[in-house]
Image (tube, helix red, strand yellow):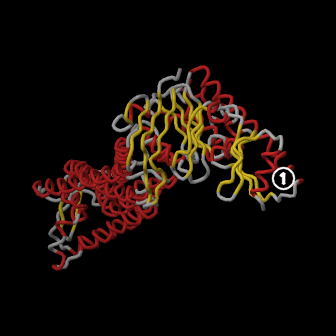
Amino acid sequence: MKNDIILQVNGLSKSIKGLPVLSDFNMEIFEGDICGIIGPNDSGKTMLLRAIAALINPDKGKIEIFGKKLIPNRAAILSKVGFLIGEPVFYDHLNLFDNLLLFARYSGGDKDNEEINRTLKRVGLYDQSDEKVGKLASGDRKKLAIAMAIYNNPPLIILDEPFSSLDIKSFDEIKSLLKTINRDQGTTIVVATKRLSELQGFINRIVLMEGGRLISEGDVEELFGRSNVGLVIETDNPSKAVKLIKESNLPVDNVVIKDGHVRVNCEKKVIPFINEYLMVSEVQVFALRPDDAISSYYLTFTE
Amino acid sequence: MILQETYKIFTRPYAKIVLLVMLVLMLIFSAAFAFEGQEYYDSLLNTFGKGVSFEGKLLNGNLFAFQLFHALWLLVALMVVFVTGGMISEEKSAGTLRMVLSRKISKTGFFTARFAAAKIFAFIVVAFMAAISLGVGLAVFGSGELLAFDNGKFTVLTANQALLSFALAYVFYFLMLLTVISISMFFSVLFKSSIKAILVTVSVIMVFYFISTLELPLFDGVKPFLFTSYFSSWAQFFTTPVDWMKLTFDAIVLLVHILVFYTASVMIFGKQEVLD
């Protein structure tokens, strides 16, 4: 049984200078999820997060968080959400502690030295708490931004590209920290990234977007749990290729010609055998590619 | 929140630079006053003939503070713009506004806190100016009657009258600085670049002030509508009798400007999207 919906986006549209950046976008995230919002550059991920943080005014649609409309409950809602949107920027002339304190106060919190130190410890920056933020390496800046997002244990954390510019060790540490927060506190975590591979074994729910539109959303198991992938084969002789594949003993389904190319459903591991079989049979294979975005993501995700 | 924003102002170098420049200007003026003052004021008194009677030492702390105020008031106001002109635009261009406004604090709350911090900064500037000019002036040059002259008119005030006049003049000057701040923050909301916001504010003040001070009938109809026409009204506290009606009107005009620019800034800022 599904948990309660913690974040719901309905029919969200936004244009900037006449160009649509979000088009009738819908999304649901449930309490306790670790959800990945995946899309290439300019797919609208950051704009979606800006809308969720009430930094932009959508042209259409609505956003509900914790069962309440974002507008007019912005302040009450945002006090319970930890955000990292876009490149992390700070007051570089202040030290790490003071930056965290400032942002804690912007979040409506009181000065709590203990909590600030504890949060800095959690992201491994406690020893640098007196250093000026301007001197931090980009990976440490990202960690500080994550510290700001997790400060005071908000029930919902939304992070935009949290793993970029982290080295492998820090990447594993932050991922593990977020997992622990999710497991121990039931915190819902939303991570937007263009690199699906970063989220392997981390997320349980996925939202795929491209060109400001939703391609698909669902549980990772539902979406990627299937064994088959749709494959398009570009050859010099599609009819011969279809005949050969059908006559072969290869485990494939739905072998058809569509738009001048061969289309089959098969397991990922079968793809090299199809390629080899066609080549041995003197059918030239120009390209093998996934036949839709989800298959494309699937291939990336299951690398 | 206001204290936090004030802290942010004073951790930036600009605020310290403004106070340092003020101190340097005051030191230069002190040296000139100490070495050349007597000769200058004697010749000035001679040009006005024997009609001025004066008891005690002419060159005293009150005259020092009065002349310093005259020399610095506009410069200091323009220097304040260097700090307050970037209060919103700098947050926009640096991207910190995105980080701040994705928190609980509202745009109105953030702007108001910054505006209040700018007010505190202005208060500190006026207090600093008063402390140095009056404090140091009285300590070094001693007290005495104030020979105040403005626009070719002499007024002699007793030491006690002078102190009261200074207090009221500083209050009015604070009001004038708040007007400057509200204008600079308005442009800071409009522009993403701090330099642009500062330059536009300084340009507007300079052009308006230039027109306000021109003794040409051509601009007489415009002058009442320029806020700069009320900027130097603080000097009227050193005249006798004080024209309270005019000063009250001038103060109300400045207050209305502060309110209008603050409201316009809040409304425009509230509608702006954070896309940086």
Q: Is residue B45 above or below residue A209?
A: below
Q: Nearer the viewer, residue B237 or A213?
A: A213
Secondary structure type for disc 1: helix
B226 relative position to A143: left or right: left
Which quarter of the rendering shows the N terminus of chain B? top left
A237 relative position to A118: left or right: right
- The amino acid type found where label 1 is placed reads Leu
Residue B13 in picture, x, y percent from top left: 52, 52
In the rendered image, which quarter is residue A268 located in? top right
Residue drawn at (16%, 66%) of the image: B224
Q: Kindly tell me whether residue A102 is visible in this rendering.
A: no
B232 relative position to B131: left or right: left
Within 10 angstroms of label 1, few (less than 14), some, or many (20 or more) residues?
some
Residue located beneath label 1 in the image: A278
Residue drawn at (17%, 61%) of the image: B155
Q: Kindly tell me whether residue A33 is visible in this rendering.
A: yes
In the rendered image, which quarter is residue B236 located in? bottom left
A234 relative position to B267: left or right: right
